[in-house]
Amino acid sequence: MPTCTDPASPMNAAGYASRRVTKPPNWHELVAFDMLFNNMTTGLFVVAAAGDLVSRPAFGPLTRLAYPMALLFLTIDLACLVLDLGHRFRFHHMLRVFKPSSPMSLGTWCLTAYSIPLGLLSTIEVLEMAGIREIPAWMRLASITTGIPFAMGAAMYKGVLFSTTSQPGWKDSRWLGGYLTNSAIAIGCAELLAIADLAGQGPVRAIRTSLLALLAINLGFLATLIVELRPAIRTLKGGHRLDLMLTLGAALGVWVPAILILVSGTMPTIASAIIDGIGMVLVLAGNFLVRRSIVMLPHHENDDGIVARWDGGS
Amino acid sequence: MNARELEISAIPEPAETPSGPVATILGPFLPVVRPEPRTPTGFYTDTTVCIGCKACEVACKQWNQLPSDGLNWSGDSYDNTQALSATSWRHVKFIEQFASAGADAPSRWLMMSDVCKHCSAAPCQHACPTGAIIYNEFSNVYIQPDICNGCAYCIAACPFGVITRSDLDGHAHKCTLCYDRQRDGLIPACAKACPTASIQFGPIDELRDRAHRRIEELNSRGTPSAYLYGEAPTATYSELHSFYLLVDRPSTYGLPESPFNPWLRMRGDYLRSLLGGLAAIVAMILVWTLRMP
Ligand code: SF4
Ligand code: SF4
């Protein structure tokens, strides 16, 4: 910045040009967790629902556990959303308008709508598991079919929410939504594989192969996203650390689990279950790293020796 | 100064505000009567006459009862405010363009009072999921403090870095264009206080005419670099209801060279999201069908 005491500074004429104009929102780790749990619940639901529709006899024992787990993840996700607000007791204000122009409004409505069939399905599963009563098949089918579009909507909005902003990196990431929605399904598949291993039932081999295919596709989306983010990352102080985190995220979330799952297919049941479990934990860890790097990107200063004056408050 | 108070018009009496826990929860959901649209108003800031006195900053703080930001000596010329924020809705910027010793170039000191641009298609308004951000009857962008829940999406959306969230109440705040004063037929406190009429307030069409006349005057007096920023829409951004007369590049004043409304890309982004999901689901079902007995 120009100062009276440094009249010869080459920056004098540039005025405020070296300062970033936009201010980062007050979004930090909690939002990265929210992104992860959003993908964990919607992905698990969509994968389980697809399994139910493809073959109820094969996937039934797994979806019985999957829906209540998806409900648990949704609860954690909602808690993250509420805790991240400046005024937590006003979360319900999100539902006073339906505003398709706002991805956050659309997303909140999708999550709310998704919670109803998910809650119903979880109740059905718990009632049946407890042997309390047999629920008519049409009820399950209706809940699954109404839940899928809302779960997809809830998975899709998050990336669009970030890309329709004026923040460095985010505003250029046209494939962020594509990546997040794609990884939601991959995460869901990894979760279902872990459930199948735990339950010792279900088409484990088919799920394992499909997870490998999903990880391969996900790598393509992640690579595209990294290419889009890189120009913005290069302008940041500590940008190389962010770059490293993204690469580490790709390695932990895609490469290593893919290798582990390839190996586990050749192992005896118990060993393969353990390796699959480790693979799933790595998928989650890698995906968290990627999400954290994305969320924290605008909080990094520009790499021009000029300190950003505003860090977004709390 | 050529800014004048508007005539006090028939002002509707505010309704009794309901109170209590039920009203707190349900209040924002109750229907309200929208005021009739009025002539769109805004600011025209002629930076060539700004003297950096900061009377606008003080008047804004005083009228809107904004808390102090502390006494921080930045070392950046006379700019100790540093940025617009939830507690500073006006920010006077100082740009010292002094030639190096011995150089022949003329020196100058640019000053500019920055504020929310009251964009006519405002990204912050598109973003707001609670409907807290509205265009009021004067076509100004207004945050309803009783509705905002502090989600911070508007902060991320604004291409001018205007809004921040207050640590005091957790809500987003910015210039209201003195909505309360306008309703009472008064001009905003900053425009009222500005001793050089650098900040001018009024009906937006009138301001545009005035600004164009001023550009002609400056050009004829030997300042060909004078131009208007934001008075007309561009291919990527709407017109601003708070526009500026500048004599250097926008970035010199800390303004984006060519602001972009991120909503222009929303549809494509949704489509790519869908594609990402569908690619995964189709691949997964295909593998299941092939691998399952
Ligand atoms: S300048 Fe920013 S805060 Fe002001 S109306 Fe435009 S988008 Fe909203
Ligand atoms: S912080 Fe408040 S004003 Fe800004 S988008 Fe969220 S609810 Fe709307």
Image: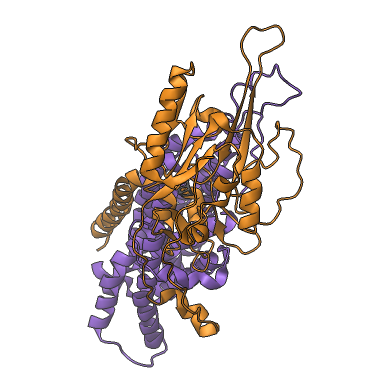
Chain colours: A purple, B orange
Expressed as whole percent of the image width and height from the top left, the position of residue A81 reads 51, 65
Position of B202 relative to B255 (above/below):
below
Q: Quadrant of the C terminus of chain A?
A: bottom right
The residue positioned 64% from the left and 53% from the top of the image is: B61
Count of numbered labels shown in the rendering = 0
Image location (x, y in percent) of residue B157: 46, 48
Relative horizontal placement of residue A25, taking residue A147 as reference (left or right): right
Observer-nearest of A123 and A230:
A230
Of residue A293 and residue B205, the one placed in the foreground of this image is B205
Task: Please name whichever residue, B126 or A64, is drawn nearer the observer in this view of the structure.
Answer: B126
Image location (x, y in percent) of residue A94? 44, 67
Q: Is residue B127 above or below residue B262?
A: below
| Left or right: A221, with A27 as reference point | left
**Which quadrant of the figure contains the N terminus of chain A?**
top right
> Residue at point 44% right, 65% down?
B130
Residue pictured at 53% horizontal, 68% vertical: A82
Name the side, left or right, on which A95 lies relative to B75.
left
Q: Position of residue B240 (x, y in %)?
A: 41, 42
| Residue B19 shows in the view | yes
Residue toward you, B105 or A169? B105
Residue A216 relative to residue B94: left or right: left
Q: Is residue A267 above or below residue A144?
A: above
From where the camera sits, is residue A208 visible?
no
